[in-house]
Image (spheres, rainbow, N blue to C red):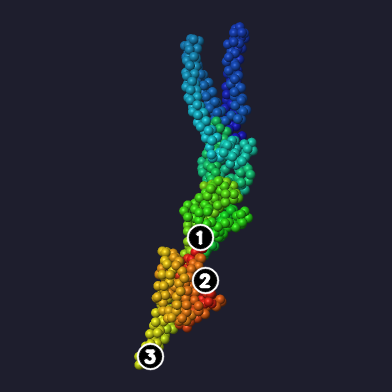
Amino acid sequence: MDSDSMKRILGGGGISVLGTLATVLTLYDVYQDFVLQGSPLLLTVLESALPLLLNLALIAAGLVIVTDESLRVGFITHTTKWTLLGALSLLTIVGWVYYFQVIQDDIEPLVLFTHVVSMGAVAGFAVGVYDGQRRERAEQLTAEHDKILALFENSTDCIAEVGFVEGRPIVREVNPSFVDVFGFDRSEIIDRSLDETIIPEPETERAAALTERAGRSEQFEVQDVVRQTADGEYRVVRLQVVPLSSMSSNADAYAVYTDVTSEHRYEQRITALHESTRELVTIGSIEGVASATVAAVEEILDLSFISVHLYDDDAGKLRPAAYSSDIAGLIGEPPSFAPGEAIAWDVFETGTARYVEDVHADPEAYNGSSPVRSELILPLQGYGVLLIGAQTPSAFDETDFSLAKILAANVETAMERAEREARLEQQNDQLETFTSVVSHDLKNPLGVATGYLGLAREGDEEAFDRVENALERMDGLIENLLTLARQGESIDEVRPVALRTVAERAWNNTTTANATLQIQTDAVLEADADRLQQLFENLFTNAVEHGGDDVTVRVSSTDSGFVVEDDGPGIPESEREAVLAHGYTTHQDGTGFGLAIVNEVANGHGWSVRVDASESGGAGFVFETST
């Protein structure tokens, strides 16, 4: 027998025994009055009826306390205490008065009655004060209960009232948020174990430890607890356990679950985005970064309709560089965007991200009837744009937009690094070229100069001429080398220059013997005049060296640029790509840098150059400066 059952039996039994003792004394008084003293039966019954009923009520109350297990132990203890204290108080006062009347041999019923009345009045006053305080406290508890109930019902947190039965957390009540988040009907979870309802298998051991703590009336909070909904979905929650001590409640604790699934997933995505950045920056090309970006959006953001458009400087458009298979299946190859004909171009130009909630309702949309109904468009500063679409309007929320912006910023960083590494690789190639020239090409004329200088010292006057030629050869190599290094840099500032003026100035600065220059253009280009002049000087020198002293060189315009051609022997088709490389030459005294410098100047302007044949069969260099 446990302690609660023992307290119930002792308390209820004590009250019943008191009632029984009083009943026996009352019945004895009836016997004495009626049988021994001969008092009228009616008066005797009327005299003892009320005390007898009260005594029987005490007996019944004691039996109820013993048998009714729903009564809380605290209530039983307080009731028994006040009953016995009340009886003892009345007995003490009546016994005190009666004792002194017996000593005086003067029984005075009036005095005894007066004391009993006074004692009843004092008892009534005490009970009245107690009842008033109890009612006031009850009203406060009711107000607090109403507030707690309102909080319980209206809280956005999921709350379950639980009572512990043999160590199991039995659900007594749940609030509406609990029903909404976990998907259970109240009837499906009330009177069931919380641990057996929403705890997924991997969390069983951890949940058992938490239940044990809650059963010891501990108050605590635990972060990142995983719980399972009615349809099997896992939710990440923050658990707070609040023990209850009110005797008016049949629950032992509140289990409060704050759903942090969205925040948890956001943090996971942020971490994945930063990890993807580390992967993106290892990719050596801008096009490779674009392809990896599409994969990252699919894997990390769990979105499907994606494309990366990069700016094509030659075409002056945003062209698709990479796109997902889903977008290809939906619309085929994504279109290119020219200036002013799409929202994507505006985003590229302004550098401001856009969320188009309904493509069909936006007048700036490229295709007002596109199956892509909503779209995130993120600028990749200077490189292009990232487009993420969906087939329903308003498909994205602020979290999607925020994460997409973070990814776009990471992609920009990766593309900048790829571009920087490409420039570094180009510079390294130039350095290798410089090293080759210094270690090989300069070594030959230096050796010649050194050898003939020895002969000159021995009196050979002609040796000085050989030394001078070797030094001039070295000077030319060094000058071309420095020019090549400078031409490899990008062109930052350009201005309108007349093609005719620059070509004439270059011709005048070139040793051309009896060669002839024909200029058939009045075109004006956006260019760096000094570097453009260097381009012409190298082309003119190449024409004279390979076409002879009387070669004719012609400069003319094309629809997309200009061409420089001569009537010399031309360049074999198999060698046309090679002639633009560093160090390529077919001339005994050539450095192999002249046409390489031409190519570098063109690239620095963002132009392209190809080697072709002129109308007369000579060499032709065709420059594409615009589309």
Q: Which mark is residue 316?
A: 1
Residue 15 visible in this rendered orientation of the protein: yes
Measured as percent of width and height from the top left, residue 104 is found at: 47, 11
Q: Is 487 situated above or below 306?
A: below
* Towards the viewer: 57 or 468: 468
Residue 270 visible in this rendered orientation of the protein: no
Residue shown at 51% from the left, 27% from the top = 138
* Disc 2 residue crowd, few under 14, some 14–19, many 20+, Cα 10 Å: some
Residue shown at 47% from the left, 15% from the top = 118
For discs 2 and 3, the disc positioned in front in the rendered view = 2
Tell me the kind of residue under disc 3. Glu
Judged from the image, the secondary structure of the residue bearing numbered disc 2 is: strand
Measured as percent of width and height from the top left, residue 568 is found at: 50, 79
Tell me the kind of residue under disc 1. Gly
Judged from the image, the secondary structure of the residue bearing numbered disc 1 is: loop
Q: Which residue is mark 3?
A: 462
> Do tag 2 and tag 3 residues touch (Cβ < 8 Å)?
no
Q: Which mark is residue 610?
A: 2
